[in-house]
Image: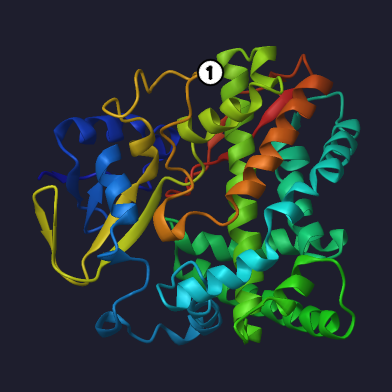
């Protein structure tokens, strides 16, 4: 197993990390990524297995858990109630309760409203060059989450601000200033939701918060902290990933010379899967070893962390023919962008629906859409999204 050096904050790497992934894959499934101080899995078979291996999980082993710095208390308290970093039996309980409220039926019911929203946003596009990321790719998912939660649409800018500050905690470029901003945003977000949940307790509606309050299984309900943590997770994870899924997708389509058949009813599922495979919004997810485990010739000890390179797995030539080629017609058999196993993204159906609606409406209404300047990715690894997407109709 080799030791690799590649700063995740290197601007050249943030613009195109795929050559680094390709070189790592050629040399083996696992390598020590020195900049992170942990073993990283680059090949599809290794990532696929580790996502499902119950000897590994998201929750920090108890003997490694330490109190965090005082200035991060609000953020860490919210993370402690998040389903994202929980393991069974707590994860099983939380996920079942959430899925009782976050149903495929409720998500599918958004479709007519989403189409209307997309058309309204496009009608407001200016004739001069503009940032599609701000005018469209950001608006669709955040307004969809607001509608699902039952939060007023005028709160969207504030929710975005809180979300951006919290999600910055997972970026390689995180600083102490980032931490203070995230803690303040978490406290403000939680205070807002706590008041809003209490209002919904007294005046139930048809929204997700009301359904989360009512979600119950064998007499067990979400606690107030779990409910608020779930709402924050759904907004942060659902919004951030879909914004960049849409942005990266439009960029790729324009650069590749999009074809009308990609957007047809029989082709749209393949297009969305290929966008998410080819240039996903999340490139890395980590796990802890819970026991001694030998994987692909390396022995992990309890407490060791391993980085799963989802985007590297998506372009593994051992799992997919010609993976560097963008081909929406290919069978969607290799796509690790939503994770896998127990922690497969609960918001995946919503993200897919938003992309399946937003992309056809955009290109049907704006068939002459073109790039107004070369797109540039943000230096925010392990997320992978654009700073802006300047286009011209």
Residue situated furthest front in the rendering = 218
Identify the residue at image location x=29%, y=35%.
21
Q: Is residue 393 visible?
A: no
In depth, the one of 74 and 242 nearer the eye is 242
Q: Which residue is mark 1?
A: 329
Circle 1 crowding by C-alpha within 10 Å: few under 14, some 14–19, many from 20: some
Q: Is residue 126 above or below residue 234?
A: above
Left or right: 79 in relation to 391? left
Q: Find residue 371 and report its image quarter.
A: top right
Q: Is residue 186 visible?
A: yes
Of residues 75 and 324, the one drawn nearer to the viewer in this rendering? 324
Whole-percent x, y for residue 380 in the image: 48, 49
Q: Quadrant of residue 364?
A: top right
Picture coordinates of residue 190 (x, y %)? 67, 78
Q: Which image quarter: residue 162?
A: bottom right
Which residue corresponds to the image point at 56% horizontal and 57% vertical from the top-left?
A: 346
Image quadrant occupied by the C terminus: top right
Q: At 37% across and 72% down in the image, what residue appears?
A: 59
Picture coordinates of residue 340 (x, y %)? 42, 51
Determine the residue positioned at 30% across, 46% down: 47
Percent x, y for residue 213? Answer: 73, 79
Q: Quadrant of the N terminus?
A: top left
**Up-down relation of residue 228 to residue 332 (above or below):** below
Could you tell whether 14 is left or right of 42 in the image? Answer: right
Circle 1: element type: loop
């Amino acid at each position: 197993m080799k030791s690799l050096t590649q700063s995740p904050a290197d601007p050249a790497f943030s613009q195109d990390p795929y050559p680094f992934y390709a070189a790592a894959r050629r040399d083996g499934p696992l390598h020590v990524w020195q900049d992170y101080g942990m073993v990283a899995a680059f090949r599809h078979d290794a990532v696929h297995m580790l996502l499902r291996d119950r000897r590994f999980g998201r929750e920090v082993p108890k003997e490694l858990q330490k109190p965090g710095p005082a200035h991060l208390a609000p953020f860490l308290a919210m993370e402690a109630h998040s389903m994202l970093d929980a393991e069974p039996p707590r994860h099983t309980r939380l996920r079942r309760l959430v899925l009782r409220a976050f149903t495929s039926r409720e998500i599918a019911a958004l479709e007519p409203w989403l189409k209307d929203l997309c058309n309204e946003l496009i009608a407001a596009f200016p004739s001069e060059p503009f940032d599609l990321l701000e005018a469209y790719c950001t608006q669709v998912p955040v307004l969809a989450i607001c509608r699902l939660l039952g939060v007023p649409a005028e709160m969207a800018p504030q929710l975005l601000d809180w979300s951006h500050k919290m999600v910055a905690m997972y970026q390689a470029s995180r600083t102490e200033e980032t931490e203070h901003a995230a803690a303040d945003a978490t406290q403000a977000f939680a205070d807002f939701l706590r008041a809003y949940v209490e209002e919904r307790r007294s005046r139930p509606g048809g929204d997700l918060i009301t359904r989360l309050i009512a979600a119950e299984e064998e007499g067990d309900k979400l606690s107030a902290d779990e409910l608020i943590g779930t709402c924050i997770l759904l907004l942060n994870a659902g919004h951030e990933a879909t914004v960049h899924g849409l942005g990266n997708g439009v960029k790729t389509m324009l650069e590749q010379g999009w074809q009308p058949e990609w957007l047809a009813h029989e082709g749209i599922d393949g297009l969305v899967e290929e966008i998410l495979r080819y240039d996903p919004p999340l490139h890395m997810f980590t796990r802890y070893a819970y026991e001694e485990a030998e994987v692909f010739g390396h022995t992990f000890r309890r407490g060791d962390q391993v980085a799963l390179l989802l985007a590297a797995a998506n372009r593994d030539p051992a799992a997919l023919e010609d993976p560097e080629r963008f081909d929406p017609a290919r069978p969607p058999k290799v796509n690790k962008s939503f994770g896998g196993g127990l922690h497969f993204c609960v918001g995946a159906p919503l993200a897919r629906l938003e992309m399946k609606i937003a992309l056809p409406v955009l290109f049907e209404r704006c068939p002459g859409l073109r790039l107004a300047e070369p797109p540039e990715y943000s230096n925010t690894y392990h997320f992978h999204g654009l700073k802006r997407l300047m286009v011209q109709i």
